[in-house]
């Protein structure tokens, strides 16, 4: 099936992926391409969106797209930099703003009887993020909306289906952003809403059958959402010709190896569990530097995975749970040649001599779409709702060197924290949570005895994509109960702290 497609040209905005996700939420398929690499099959796109940019149209580093094949021929929505670009190079004027226009604003004027702004009224909140402003509209420009500080907040160009806005409809703070995208894509551009999880599953399974035939495929399962959904799609397509390998690196959560393996077998997957925990811990002995720990884990994973893959006769394909953000990040938004897609967490980059072809069934999807696709295949809700978990596992939540005893302590602490989040109905309100074992001992008192034991930090954040994150304001009663339980039940811990740092400046993981 050939979907109606929307082309998003990326000028380097931090919000470009968010635009794509908002379009996908309307059940419309879209693709992000660098502004200077417009696809040769541009005829297959029904509408075009120009993203924002940290650059200025008045500066020396102007990003010049070639819009000859698009402008006036297809419906186009220019956002922020895109709006300023159209004005600056089409007879209008862009100047430095007297005040930095950043943050919430409200529309003070909305042109009536305008399809683009249907069901959007004066007072609607929008999100601004720019230091330049459009002083004069381009040739043929018609004012559509203003705020108190920005006269030309939205405009259209007569004789074209070209619309431009100086705010960001894709961010949560623009309260009618969804409506505006709906007006542009569905009412004006007449794009059909045919991108659904069910259609994706059917088309992907059919495509995989054609691509793989009777070949054997090996997949490294991580226990996470992406690799699990990829496995189910492949299983639907090729059944027992899919060979899944789930490696226990000794750094998983408490009982996770057994629990997840049991869950996979209940899904009908052809899975082999490999307990290589001793091999990983031996390789990590004495290592404290986070990068050295990561490299050691990656190297041993490759060795274990390679050993197991060679036991399967005539494997032709390696499956990976690559998702769309991984693909986007591998392409330069500022004009360089496309980079090779990076090695992904499921397999950590495999040695050249394996000579396997790569199949990536999820490479068109965002994380939230992966979950919806999994739900449409009736996959377990708890598996689909799992928090992200780092590839190196607890190794980067144990600061400093690793020992089997430190892993045991952190597994126990983590289990209490996660189980309490579930029992208090807080787990699904948190994007990611975990515990860190700190490389310090602190003095405590238990009974009448002085103790000198470990300190652990609990971390819970809310986010949409992990790029930015805010710490979650967990109830004091919850933290009190969890802290008491950890100190009373986990031998070796006498102090619990809660991390209230946001990202940026702090990362989600501590290492």
Image (cartoon, helix red, strand yellow):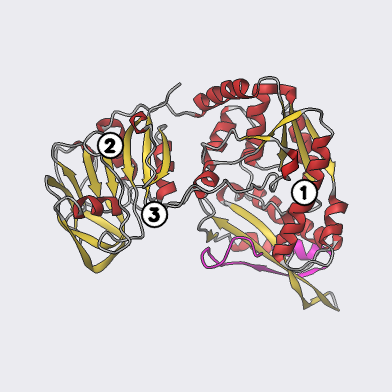
Q: Residue at x 20, y 55 (%)?
A: 88
Residue 385, position as x, y percentages in the image: 61, 42
Question: Alpha carbon of mark 2 to alpha carbon of mark 3: how far?
Answer: 23 Å
Q: Residue 13 shows which numbered tag?
A: 3
Secondary structure under tag 1 reads helix
Work out whether 313 lies above or below 122. Answer: above
Q: Which residues are magenta?
A: 482-511
Residue 448 in the image: x percent, y percent?
85, 78
Q: Looking at the image, is 251 positioned above or below residue 25?
A: below
Question: Which residue is drawn at the image coordinates 81% and 59% (left, top)?
Answer: 407
On screen, residue 308 versus residue 427, left or right, reads: right
Quadrant in which the C terminus appears: bottom right
Please tell me which of labels 2 and 1 falls first in the chain.
2
| Residue assigned mark 1 | 301
Q: Residue at x 32, y 51 (%)?
A: 168
Q: Which residue is mark 2?
A: 69
Residue 498 occupies quadrant? bottom right
Pointer 1 or 3: first along the chain? 3
């Amino acid at each position: 099936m050939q979907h109606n497609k929307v082309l998003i040209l990326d000028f380097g905005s931090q919000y470009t992926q968010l635009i794509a996700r908002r379009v996908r939420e309307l059940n419309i398929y879209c693709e992000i391409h660098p502004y200077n690499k417009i696809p040769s099959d541009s005829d297959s796109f029904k509408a075009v969106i120009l993203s924002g940019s940290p650059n200025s149209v008045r500066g020396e580093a102007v990003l010049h797209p070639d819009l000859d094949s698009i402008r006036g021929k297809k419906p186009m929505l220019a956002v922020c930099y895109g709006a300023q670009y159209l004005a600056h190079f089409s007879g209008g004027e862009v100047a430095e703003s007297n005040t930095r226009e950043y943050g919430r604003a409200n529309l003070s004027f909305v042109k009536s009887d305008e399809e683009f702004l249907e069901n959007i009224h004066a007072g609607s909140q929008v999100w601004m993020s720019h230091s330049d402003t459009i002083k004069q509209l381009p040739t043929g420009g018609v004012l559509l909306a203003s705020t108190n500080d920005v006269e030309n907040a939205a405009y259209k160009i007569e004789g074209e289906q070209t619309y431009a806005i100086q705010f960001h409809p894709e961010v949560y703070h623009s309260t009618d952003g969804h409506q505006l995208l709906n007006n542009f894509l569905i009412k004006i551009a007449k794009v059909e809403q045919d991108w659904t999880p069910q259609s994706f599953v059917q088309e992907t399974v059919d495509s995989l059958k054609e691509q793989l035939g009777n070949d054997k495929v090996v997949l490294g399962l991580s226990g996470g959402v992406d690799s699990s959904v990829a496995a189910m799609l492949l299983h639907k397509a090729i059944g027992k010709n899919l060979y899944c390998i789930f490696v226990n690196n000794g750094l998983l959560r408490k009982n996770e190896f057994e629990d997840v393996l049991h869950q996979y077998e209940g899904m009908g997957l052809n899975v082999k569990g490999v307990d290589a925990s001793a091999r990983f811990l031996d390789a990590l002995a004495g290592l404290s530097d986070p990068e050295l720990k990561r490299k050691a884990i990656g190297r041993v994973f490759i060795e274990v995975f390679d050993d197991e893959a060679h036991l399967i006769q005539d494997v032709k394909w390696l499956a990976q749970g690559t998702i769309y953000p991984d693909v986007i990040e591998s392409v330069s938004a500022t004009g360089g040649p496309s980079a090779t897609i990076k090695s992904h967490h499921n397999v950590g980059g495999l040695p050249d001599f394996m000579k396997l072809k790569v199949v990536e069934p999820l490479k068109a999807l965002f994380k939230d779409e992966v979950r919806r696709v999994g739900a449409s295949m009736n996959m377990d809700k708890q598996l689909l709702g799992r928090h992200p978990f780092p590839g190196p596992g607890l190794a980067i939540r144990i600061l400093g060197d690793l020992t089997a005893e430190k892993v045991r302590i952190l597994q126990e602490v983590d289990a209490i924290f996660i189980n309490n989040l579930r029992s208090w109905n807080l787990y699904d309100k948190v994007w990611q949570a975990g515990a860190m074992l700190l490389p310090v001992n602190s003095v405590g008192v238990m009974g009448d005895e002085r103790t000198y034991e470990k300190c652990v930090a609990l971390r819970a954040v809310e986010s949409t994509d992990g790029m930015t994150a805010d710490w979650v304001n967990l109830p004091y009663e919850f933290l009190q109960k969890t802290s008491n339980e950890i100190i009373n039940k986990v031998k070796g811990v006498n102090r619990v702290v809660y991390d209230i740092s946001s990202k940026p400046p702090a990362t989600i993981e501590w290492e």
